Image: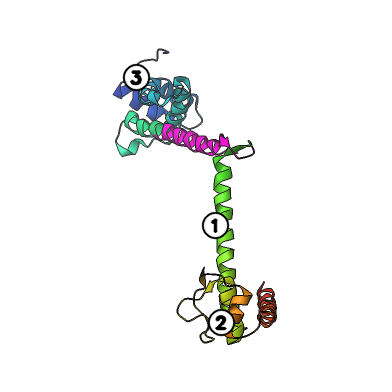
Amino acid sequence: MKTFQQPLSAEEEACCIKNMQEEGSESAKEARTLLIERNLRLVAHIAKKYQNLDEDMEDLISIGTIGLIKAVNTFDAAKKIRLSSYASKCIENELLMMIRGRKKKSKEVSLYEPIGTDKEGNEISLLDIIENEQTDILEQMELERRVRKLGELLCTRLDDREREIICMRYGILIPGEEVSGGTAAPAVFIGHGEEVTQREIGAMLGISRSYVSRIEKKALEKLRLGMEAVE
């Protein structure tokens, strides 16, 4: 590692800080440069603590030096603390911001890195999976909305016999009421029961299979029109 100059004594530091107050003068510029150069050892000392994070030491010192420069530029001697104490915090902050920034960037990049292949052999990334999950959620919400609306239409657009035949024909269950019950719209429409053929429905209701078919067709048309009206 590069050898850095020894830090200033308390008296030398105080003198440089005083000279820095003469803004625009050569002595102020020289004092500022001296304060930075003589505190580079402090930068190196703090940077060493972050070597185990697989960071390049030269990069750590460069970033730490930026923190040191900020400290020298903003130091307030009226607070009665040593510049080294104030600079240590500034250097630490600068290094931590750099490390956090790189970690965030690393996570963003990793979203695009291949993590496997799909059924067709195409590479897929974590981002692909996340996007697919988001799409599935939206599709599920839309499906639930349409199912709820269909449940309402079953009870508001169809008469008792039409609703009874449709529910038996397609195994539809409306919780909280009998399949052939009243016309109040259910709060939730769920589930599938056992599907029944037209012939079986006709036998149970004492009507012909063809009559069941006509009722079913009419009821489905009512439901279709009802769904289209809310799309």
Q: CA distance from mark 3 to mark 1?
A: 61 Å
Point out the frontmost of discs 2 and 1: 2
Q: Kindly identify which residue carries mark 3.
A: 7
User: Residue 197's x, y, as percent?
Assistant: 61, 72
Decide if residue 23 is on the left or right side of residue 43: right
Point out the frontmost of discs 3 and 1: 1
Q: Kindly identify which residue carries mark 2.
A: 204
Magenta residue check for 103? yes
Q: Give the quadrant of the N terminus.
A: top left
Quarter of image, res 10: top left
Amino acid type at circle 3 is Pro
For the residues bearing labels 3 and 1, Cβ distance under 8 angstroms: no
Image vertical order of residue 182 relative to residue 13, above or below: below
User: Which of pointers 2 and 1 lies earlier in the amino acid sequence?
Assistant: 1
> Mark 3 falls on what kind of element?
loop
Q: Residues within 10 Å of mark 1 (few under 14, many from 20)?
A: few
User: Residue 80's x, y, as percent?
Assistant: 29, 36
Q: Residues within 10 Å of mark 3 (few under 14, many from 20)?
A: some
Quarter of image, res 225: bottom right
| The disc label shown at residue 137, or none | 1
Magenta stretch: dominant SS? helix
User: Residue 63's x, y, as percent?
Assistant: 47, 28
What residue do we see at 59% from left, 84% from top? 156
